Image (cartoon, helix red, strand yellow):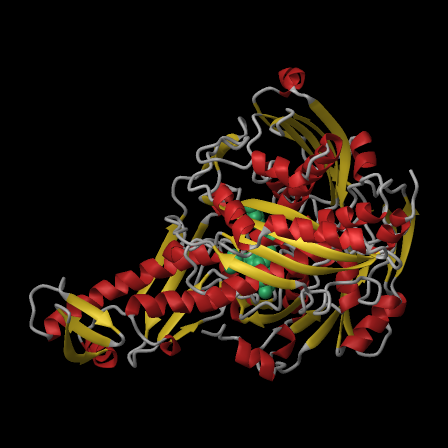
Amino acid sequence: MKNYDILQHVKGESQFVDDILVPEGLLYAAVYYSQIAHGKIISINLDKAEKINGVKSIFTSKDIPGDNQIGGIIQDEELLATDKIEFIGQPIAIVIADNQLNAKAAARLINLELEKLPAVFDARKAAKNNLLIVPPRTFSQGSTEDCWSECDYIVEGQADSGAQEHLYLETQSAIAYPVEGGGIKIISSTQSPTVVQKVTARILNLSMHKVEVDVLRVGGGFGGKEDQATSWAAMAGLAAFKLKKPVKLILPRQEDMRATGKRHPYSSDFKIGLKKDGSIIGYEVTFYQNAGASADLSPAILERTLFHCTNSYYIPNIKATAISCKTNLPPNTAFRGFGGPQGMFVIESAIFKSAEVMGVDPAEIQKRNLLNENDEFPYGQKAENCNTKRTWEKAERLYFINKIRSDVKYFNDTNDIYKKGSAVMPICFGISFTNTSMNQASALVHIYSDGSVSISTAAIEMGQGVNEKVRQIAAEIFSIDIGKVKTESTNTTRIANSSPTAASSAADLNGKATEQACNNILLRLKKTAAEILGKNNFESIKLKNGIVYDSNIKTDLDWSKLIKTANLNRVNLSSHSFFATPDICFDRTKEKGKPFAYHVYGTAIIEVTLDCLRGIYKFDSVKVVHDFGKSFNQLIDRGQAEGAIVQGLGWMTIEEIMYDDQGQLLTDTLSTYKVPDIYFTPEMEIDFLENAENPFGIFKSKAIGEPPFMYGIGGYFAILKAMKAFNQQLDYFFNAPLTPEKVLMNLYRKS
Ligand code: MTE
Ligand code: HPA
Ligand code: MOS
């Protein structure tokens, strides 16, 4: 079983936005961005720029016919700055020219008269100045005030985690075409065609049916195109609408890195109380989220941080507060895990520090507090079909965790310059958009008269293999060769009001819609087959491997003859179906409910070897027992797990985003921003937990896109342990990423 895009990808035949055949009269866009982090525009001078050869037009906020507003959760973000500037990289004008070079050259000649204002880049400082995106949220359970007296140990500390660049291979891209009747068609590299449609309609003052958005595939999104593909598509749309010409806007890599938001950096304070036996009695945590200059998805991400603040543990007394802080950085946005990783890093830090104080291995505390069946999360949902302990215990057995620990100790006792460390990392991740209303999808299935099948859904293929899963579902239900099934582009005229492909839910939501639509047609086909075979009852009819069976006896009616006859008999060979996740809810006034359809569980053990002369490290292995539910495509699911683990390790270790004191991104190239490569990638063993059928997932599977990302968090603690083996005076610190530079400085620090 291959992910069917693979052959085309390897041959370079897959089409991304920039590969689409150039239409007659295509124009090119370049964006002019703010060079200061906070200020006011006094005037914009376009005179010099307009004189450049080939320049057709330059658009500013004044040219927007509709509402200059792209904000989703909160309407606080302009497409093009009118007078307020809030971050470096904020779009101010769009230059349209006959080619990209001329557009770029002209953009450089735009002149601004500005008034500079003081800027804030630090989340805690913003909070002090009451610069908040939304009011703080608190999840609580039991009573932390009363619980401290029961505790034998109380440990406090701070844990910070850094930003992360999405680094999708395809940068933000769109082509917009004027269509008859004053409408616009946009081909966009977005995870959310409906958001692009809605926002472009708002910008152009059009009804949504005049804006068509089409997505063939996305060259990687990782959350970075859930909200932030929209503005570029809307800009191309604006220019195409105004000039009545097709317009292409492709961000050069460096501009993409500078102008788009990243994973939110968090700074957090924790207080944790434990008994001598290691059981956690209470946990208080305050999260400061660095949201950047506008809301974007920050409030939803903040919420997911709270949902995952206790990771895989049951803690009876909880108080978790999350504060979304407005700073003068590009608005930070969705990134694989959606705030969950940031929350989980803090509880793991608290446990790690407690273990040090108590003189035990962190794994002892982790294991003692793992969730049991029906334990209640701080948000009121119960842990059902809870596989946390099963994955932990299987990992212990399968990977000989105790032996790994003693081998590490032996290695460290017998080596001076190289030291090893290991850490266990359990994960628990809730599946569903935390915003209940977003848990909906639909599918449109056609069988053509030759028996080939075409499927449209709301799912966006961005490398995660959702299209292949959708094809498998149809092939399975019709029991035909998968080669007969094709997935179409994701298009707002075929699939309306779609949620973004996000929250790891695309295969579940769109898969279930596809399943229903196929079953609708299958029922009609069985009735048709019964008629052809002269039966008055269709219940004994089955389709198997492209052949019709009656009471398990092979007939000479095959798929293509059945479809041809059904078509002649005027049977409907198409179906549209809608799916909404049942039985989920969340009450934000009480902060309680059942927000998730189910949870994904797992346990990893990570080993690292540290070169204490140079501060560099190599992860030797990541060994995982993961709850995939009942996977129906192990190749894709394993690929998702491996990719997520490496991305998670990158976030914790070598990926460091740095801004200067003016808010200018310093790490805006691939020579200054390091990401994992094949040499960084550890050996990975991934075990599929057996007997884990998930009643709520498509074909009893579980969502896979995001959860394994959080195994990477263990990498941080494995390195800390290796460092301690070298420098016994090391004071543990929780400040990711743990770059080789940071490691080296601390290896030789005496406290
Ligand atoms: N895998 C690849 N190759 N490319 C991506 O952009 N995005 C991740 C994950 N895996 C991504 C990926 C993120 S952030 C999410 S939410 C899920 O895929 C979304 O797809 P799914 O719902 O089909 O799992
Ligand atoms: N996950 C990912 N994207 C989202 C979510 C979520 O829970 N809610 C809104 N957008
Ligand atoms: Mo994924 S961060 O939900 O796009």
Question: Which of the 4 quarters of the picture holds residue 294?
Answer: top right
Which image quarter is the C terminus in? top right
Residue closer to the observer: 132 or 233: 132
Q: Position of residue 661 (x, y in %)?
A: 91, 48
- Quadrant where ligand 1 appears: bottom right
Question: Which of the 4 quarters of the picture holds residue 46?
Answer: bottom right
Asked whether the viewer can see residue 439, the reply is yes
Reply above or below: 407 against 379: below
> Which residue is located at x 87 percent, y 63 percent?
110
> Which residue is located at x 43 percent, y 58 percent?
510
Answer left or right for 388 relative to 608.
Answer: left
Reply above or below: 527 against 204: below
> Which residue is located at x 50 percent, y 49 percent?
394
Q: How many numbered badges does the structure rendering display?
A: 0
Answer left or right for 542 relative to 273.
Answer: left
Q: Position of residue 368 (x, y in %)?
A: 57, 34
Answer left or right for 197 relative to 246.
Answer: left
Asked whether the viewer can see residue 71, the reply is no
Reply above or below: 398 against 103: above
Residue closer to the observer: 732 or 325: 732
Which image quarter is the N terminus in? bottom left
Q: Position of residue 566 (x, y in %)?
A: 20, 74
Residue closer to the observer: 22 or 622: 622
Q: Position of residue 131 (x, y in %)?
A: 77, 34
